[in-house]
Amino acid sequence: MISVIVPAHNEKENLEKLIPKLSGLAEGYDVEVLVCLSKDTTDNSEKINGFKILKYLSCTKKGRAVQMNNGAASAKGETLVFLHADVKPPNGFFKDIEQTIANGYDAGFFSYKFDKENFFLRLNSFFTSKDGIFTGGGDQCLFIKKAIFDELDGFDEKHVLMEDFEFFRRMKARKVPYSIVKNDLVVSSRKYNNNSYLRVNLTNFLLVFLFKCGYAPEKLKRLHNRLLRLPYQNSTQEV
C-alpha cells in the first residue's frame, strides 16, 4: 500500500480538486489518503469525500511537521508520500513512485512546474529536475519507505519552517538512496502573485543559507513572514 499524507490548514478549495484527482490516478493501485488537519482548521475540510480509503486526522499541536508525523504514525502503507494540498500530481504518479522503489531507491522527489506561464518560473522549474541546493523542498513531494522514515525519527517538530530541508539533510547524512522523478507536478504560483520574482527567490536563497548556518527555526519563520507578503495566511505552504 501507498499512503498519501496531505497536511492542510483551511485548504478546502484545494482539497476539493486534489482528492478526486488522486482518486483517478490511484485506479489499479492500493492507496490510502490521510488528510492531516491543523489544530486551527475552521473550513470543514473534513466533509470532503471522493476517495475509497480517506481518513481525516485532527492535530492537537501546531506545525506542518507535526501534521506529517501524525499522518505517518497512522499510515498503513509501506511507502509514505507527503503531498501539499495545492500541488497537483501528474499522470503516472503512483506508477513512478512504485517504479522508483522497485529500482532500489528508498526515497524520491518529483520535478515540478508552476501553474503560470512565465520565463523566470520556467527557469525555477528547470532546476527542480536536478539535484542541487533546493532539492528536498516540500513542493517536490517526498516519497519514502515507511521503515526508513521511522528509522530517521520522522520530521523534527521544532522546525516550524524548513522541516522538509532538515529531514532531507538527515536523509543525505544517512546516505539514503533517492531519485528525482522527471515527471512534473504542478505547483501553485500564488506566492509570486503578491511578490516579485526577485523578492521571492532572494528570500528563499537567504532562508536556505541561514538554515544551513543553524539559524533558529522560529527566527526563520518570523524573517520569512517579514520579507514576503502572504496572500494565503490560512495555507500550510510557506516556502
Image (spheres, rainbow, N blue to C red):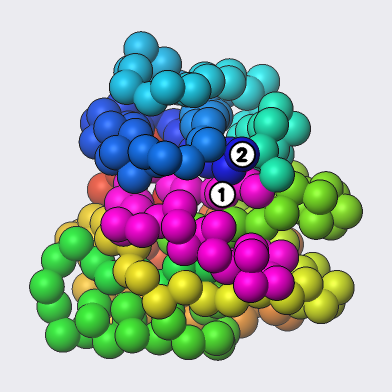
User: CA separation, marks 1 and 2?
Assistant: 11 Å
Q: Residue furthest front?
A: 28
Q: Which residue occupies the foreground of this view, 48 or 236?
A: 48
Percent across and percent down for residue 16 are 26, 29
Q: Looking at the picture, which amino acid does disc 2 mark?
A: Met
Q: Which residue occupies the foreground of this view, 141 or 165?
A: 141
Q: Residue at x 23, y 81 (%)?
A: 122
Q: Earlier in the sequence, mark 1 or mark 2?
A: 2
Percent across and percent down for residue 66 are 68, 37
Choose top left, top right, bottom left or bottom right for residue 39. Answer: top right
Q: Which residues are magenta?
A: 79-108
Question: Which is in the foreground here, disc 1 or disc 2?
Answer: 2
Residue 61 shown left or right of residue 52 in the figure: right
Q: Residue at x 52, y 76 (%)?
A: 180
Q: Looking at the picture, which amino acid does disc 1 mark?
A: Val
Kind of element beneath mark 1 = strand
Residue behind mark 2:
1
182 part of magenta stretch: no
Crowding at dot 1, Cα within 10 Å, few <14 / some 14-19 / many 20+, comes out as many
Percent across and percent down for residue 215 are 71, 69
Residue 131 shown left or right of residue 150 in the figure: left
Residue behind mark 1:
81
Choose top left, top right, bottom left or bottom right for residue 13. Answer: top left
The answer to whether residue 109 is seen in the rendering is: yes
